[in-house]
Amino acid sequence: MPASNSSAPPFLNLHLALVATDEDLFGRAVDGDGAAFRALMDRHSPAMSRAATRIVGSPLAADDAVQETRVIAWKRLAQVQEPEHVRGWLIRIATRQALTHLRLRRVEQPLPRGLPDSERNAPEVVAARNAQLEDLVHAVNALTTIQRQCWVLREIEQMRYSDIARATSLTPGQVRGNIARARLHVRVRMQGWQ
């Protein structure tokens, strides 16, 4: 993670966070500007947190996923090919981290002993739910990059089509088409679970 940029006064960092575009902040962060990286992360942390919370169902676990996303993003900044899509990239990382937390939590937390099993926590129901989640992860990972990005922003982040279009530099029609193809693909892959 970047060290604090002590050379810039706090009001300049605030100004940078308020007026700079994602592309500007990204470019500065790639050049090692810790304040720009923090501003970029702070700008998109609420969206990453909402996406992670929808998956794990716990704000605390979602915070862990977002913190891990910050570390991963810092390490992989130089690998990003399209800085204008940084919001979607960050949300995808947060989503993957949340799914990882969900899988680990299910593995690490066995059913309590001595308590009556409710139907929801019956071993066969839990196993089926885990298998369904795995199939969904595989279905989403099989999408093209742009379909996956549009699908995640719509289905997980619940963004409007116009906002997705701005985030991905696509037209609203292209966004709708990618989401429709992604939904069809996921529906076909998940047909056995319906």
Image: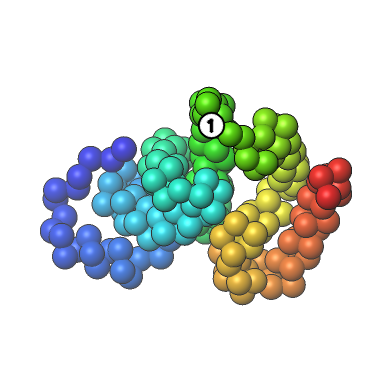
Q: Is residue 146 visible?
A: no
Q: Relative to 110, is 125 on the left or the right?
A: right
Q: How many marks?
A: 1
**Helix, strand, or loop for circle 1?**
loop
Instruction: Give amino acid for label 1.
Output: Leu
Where in the figure is residue 128, as x and y percent of width and height?
Answer: 73, 36
Q: What's the residue at 60%, 72% (across, down)?
A: 160
Q: Is residue 99 above or below residue 39?
A: above
Q: Is residue 170 above or below residue 53?
A: below
Q: Is residue 27 above or below residue 106?
A: below
Q: From the viewer's side, name the closer residue of 58 and 7.
A: 58
Q: What's the residue at 34%, 45% (across, down)?
A: 31
Where in the figure is residue 116, as x and y percent of width and height?
Answer: 58, 34
Q: Is residue 43 visible?
A: yes
Q: Which residue is mark 1?
A: 115
Q: What's the residue at 68%, 51% (across, down)?
A: 148
Where in the figure is residue 98, as x and y percent of width and height?
Answer: 52, 42
Q: From the viewer's side, name the closer residue of 194 and 177.
A: 194
Q: What's the residue at 57%, 71% (across, down)?
A: 163
Q: Is residue 154 above or below residue 123?
A: below
Where in the figure is residue 162, as x and y percent of width and height?
Answer: 61, 74
Q: Relative to 40, is 158 on the left or the right?
A: right
